[in-house]
Amino acid sequence: MTKISEMPAVAQSFISNLELPVAENPAWTPPEPAQQRRISIVSTAAVSRRGDKPFSWLARDHRVFHKTDRDLIMTHVAVEFDRSAWQQDLNVIIPLDRLEEMAQNDEIGSIADEHYSFMGAADPVTMEKSAREVAGKMKQEGVNTVFLIPI
Amino acid sequence: MCGLAHYFESEGLATVLVGFVREHMEAINPPRSLFLDFPMGRGMGKPNDPEFQNKVIRAAFDLFEAPNGPVLENFSEVIPVRDGRMGYALPPELVLSTSDIGDMDGLLSEVAAEMEALRPDYEAAILSRGRTTVGASELSIKDFAPFVAEFVKGNIPNSPRKGLPAIPLLKLVVEDLEAYYTETRTHRDRIDDLELMGRWFWEETKAGRLLLLLEAVSVASDNKVMLQIVEMSLMAPRFWSEGPLPGTSAAGW
């Protein structure tokens, strides 16, 4: 397992010193049965549709993309993660095709029409307002399940 | 990411997440999480490998069967990382200085020739994949290197893009330039190797040299934002290097 203590010095120092949010009384929502799940992806890869406003470096807001969108670009501030993977295949960070196939095979109920992206470099505490807005949009669309994927 | 899970869960949405730093997942305790021992940037593991991607998704969704939580599991397979680093890192000794700048027009010509030679395979990559990630800057491809060169020459040009200042735009141009090269090479040579891609682009290409000169100018710059870019490893990939770039503290974050 890749442990923080085994990471090179710069990364180790940065990752060790991050202030982590602690949830008081964390919520637990019972999941729906698999075939009734309508799933939306939340990515922190700072991707957006071409032409959307780029994310600022510590953005608190979010972008929306449709399940059929494939022409996405990335404006994440950090460069410490590999970008060559998603250049080859969007599904490696946002598996829209895989979820569509699972819905067709009745492994899940359906894939949501809309999916969401945040700037992963920002403090999640600053994103709370935006995250709750996203939750509201999801519920309007009948989403009951969220798949969160970092970059 | 883990913090966001709590917000969604508290809104009555069942969540599951995947993550790369297990210690953080343990500390933040999201309701359901699957630890991936993978390089960062590869949440579903492997590009163009639906079978592997499905394994990751199914392992994550299996966590919905847990009667209570928080629940944190390890994914059964590992994609090894090199020396504890989860992405490519420039060798610490590969550092240019402003005295290396030399003939910028000559270097620009070399970069232009290099890019032109890649163009047929870049276009083939787009045809094959049906998409490109190049274009976040919204500059045309032929303008990437000249825009960067202005900074290397000590200028801060006006941003051609309304609403986006020159230095944030510069960062997007740098990423577009790298994407142009790596999208082309991964398609042309049918390779998926982040270390090889990093070494090739940053250590062997003329475009990589142009960007290392930009880094040298940034370190010496009086402009706080330019300096911040290198302090925070926001341009050249030194986050996973063994030490900070000379002249910086790597403490910008």
Image: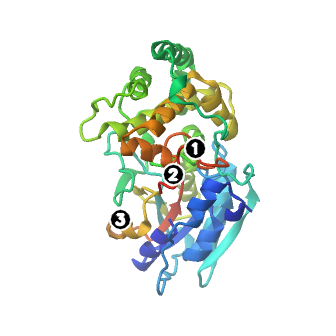
- Name the quadrant containing residue B22: bottom right
- Type of residue at label 3? Val
Kindly identify the residue that appears in the image at 71 percent across and 54 percent down.
B84
Dot 2 and dot 1 residues touching (CB under 8 Å): no
Residue B178: x and y in percent read 53, 32
For the rendered model, the colour scheme is rainbow
Q: Position of residue B28 (x, y in %)?
A: 55, 75
- Marks 3,2: beta carbons within 8 A: no
Question: SS class of the residue under badge 3?
Answer: helix
Q: Is residue A74 left or right of residue A95?
A: left
Which image quarter is the N terminus of chain A in?
Answer: bottom right
Q: Residue furthest bottom?
A: A25
The residue that disc 1 covers is B245
- Measure the alpha-carbon separation of dots 2 and 1: 38 Å
Marks 3 and 1 in Cβ contact (< 8 Å): no
Q: Nearer the viewer, residue B69 or B62?
A: B69
Q: Is residue B130 visible?
A: no
Q: Is residue B155 above or below residue A90?
A: above
| Residue denoted by label 3 | A134
User: Dot 2: within a 10 Å radius of its alpha carbon, few (fewer than 14), some, or many (20 or more) residues?
Assistant: many
The disc label shown at residue A96, or none: 2
Q: Is residue A133 placed above or below B41 in the rendered structure?
A: below
Chain of the residue displaying label 2 = A
| Residue B183 visible in the current orientation | yes
Q: Earlier in the sequence, mark 3 or mark 2?
A: 2
In space, the residues marked 3 and 1 are separated at their CA atoms by 39 Å
Q: Cα distance, mark 3 to mark 2? A: 18 Å
Q: Chain ID for label 1?
A: B
Q: Amino acid at mark 1?
A: Leu
Give SS at disc 1: loop
Q: Are marks 3 and 2 on the same chain?
A: yes
Specify whether disc 2 shares its chain with disc 1.
no
